[in-house]
Amino acid sequence: MKWGRNDPCPCGSGKKYKDCCLENRVADFQQHKWQRLAHELQDNLFSYAEEERFIPDSEEAFQVYLNIIAEDLFEPLEEPVFVSFVDWFIHDYTLKSQGKSLIRCYLVEKERELGPMEKELLQNWADSHISLLRVLAVGEEWLVLEDLLVGGEYLVQESNLAQGIVSGSILLARLIKVGDNFQLSGAALEFTPLLREEILALVTSYYISWQEDNRGKAWKEFLKQEGFKIPSLIAAVMEGEEASLPRLGAQGQDKGGEEGDQEWPEAQQLVTQILEQYYRRWVDLSVPAFSGKTPREMCRTPEGRQKVENLLKDLEQLELKRRDNGEPYFDFNNVRSLLGIKTNKYPGQRLLDSSYREVSRLLEENGDNKTWVSTAKRVWYDFYQQARPQVKKANAWAAAVIYTMARLFSERDITQKDLAHRYQVAPGTISNHYRTIWQTLNLKRFDQRYTR
């Protein structure tokens, strides 16, 4: 059966067909057309990159790429290396023979053959860059990503990716625009949320160093030029190294300069600066939780203002826990002022007894990964505030928190038996304490409270 434009919509909404599902069908058809064109263009760009005249450029670029990242994360011939290299070579690498990127060469040479939609796609892709993305939410066929460096939240319709990823994960990937949607280009690298602060601190330190020779240039330009080197920084964090940040010029040339390890208090200060910059932008960013409205727009109505304030209260509670643990924390009162919301007078720091502090000290001794320690201390803090346990043996509770962390983040190589031997306590005691912590906090794998 066919429905006329002015017939009642068959979905039962009560609207006319033209004002309801017909619009959705048109939108779906248009998006399908964008996706088809995008697929064709990606195939064409790949074939274009394989042309004989670009072989000298591609060979030189591949050597630069391998020298920078392959030894840190991959074997040189693994598929992720090749896929990531081709993506970078097409979008970001400046061809010495042409003085511009391959995708911009394609745009110029094929201009007369391209339609308006194809030109729009290519222009957007030519301006794209890789970035650090945090997974905010995951559905069956979609996920919401937050750009941790440039800012912004993006809805990505990719069922295969959505099925294999968890909320809170950190991705290193390139977002490209396809019509009204976004998708990932190339190979996305996924990292545990436990490394978020270290990765942000190192990348930001590198960005600040890069800015010394590139005054006035912003994150997008930095990521376009230097983004492919980020895996090397991440590899250093994963290996537990105190990574020094070389002053690297365009496309892999070492410029020398002073070397020196970044002190973590300074790095933590850089993370705080990122958060301040991000939340200044956040008040005017479209937020999926607010149906696409910005926080500033939400604050124009009493109901919207209340929703924004509720979200800020949740974020503030997380930061107060960090403060009470003696960690650097973010003050949301500046954000409140930007939105015209009454500022908070935070309660004084809660003093916790010596047994609590002793378990925290043991957790700090357990690992060099600062984010792991921070998250473990947050778990211990939350449990302690709710249960106020009698801590007769700090070792037993520290071991239980470590085992809880292993279960939270699926670290299968950490066992109760090994922890019992290390901390000189009975495995059964660790098991009992672990179950108490898990049940008291109502935890689940990759719990979003501890992956933010």
Image (cartoon, rainbow, N blue to C red):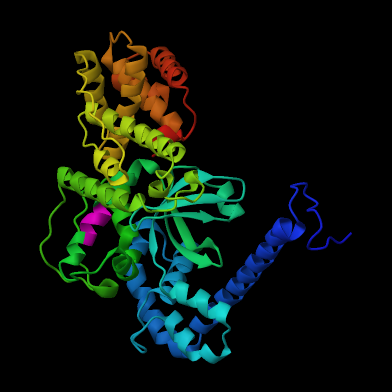
Magenta span contains residue 206? yes
Q: Quadrant of the N terminus?
A: bottom right
Viewer-closest of 177 and 232: 177
Up the image or down, 389 lies above or below 361; here it is above
Magenta region, mostly helix, strand or loop? helix
Q: What stretch is highlighted in magenta?
A: 202-207
Q: Is residue 245 left or right of residue 181?
A: left
Query: Is 167 rendered above or below residue 427?
Result: below
In depth, the one of 69 and 160 nearer the eye is 160
Residue 138 appears left or right of 217? right
The image position of residue 255, as x and y in percent, is 17, 71
At x 37% / y 53%, what residue is drawn? 284
Residue 112, position as x, y percentages in the image? 54, 91
The quarter of the rendered structure image containing the C terminus is: top left
Q: In which quarter of the image is residue 117?
A: bottom right
Does the magenta segment cover residue 325? no
Q: Position of residue 108 (x, y in %)?
A: 46, 88
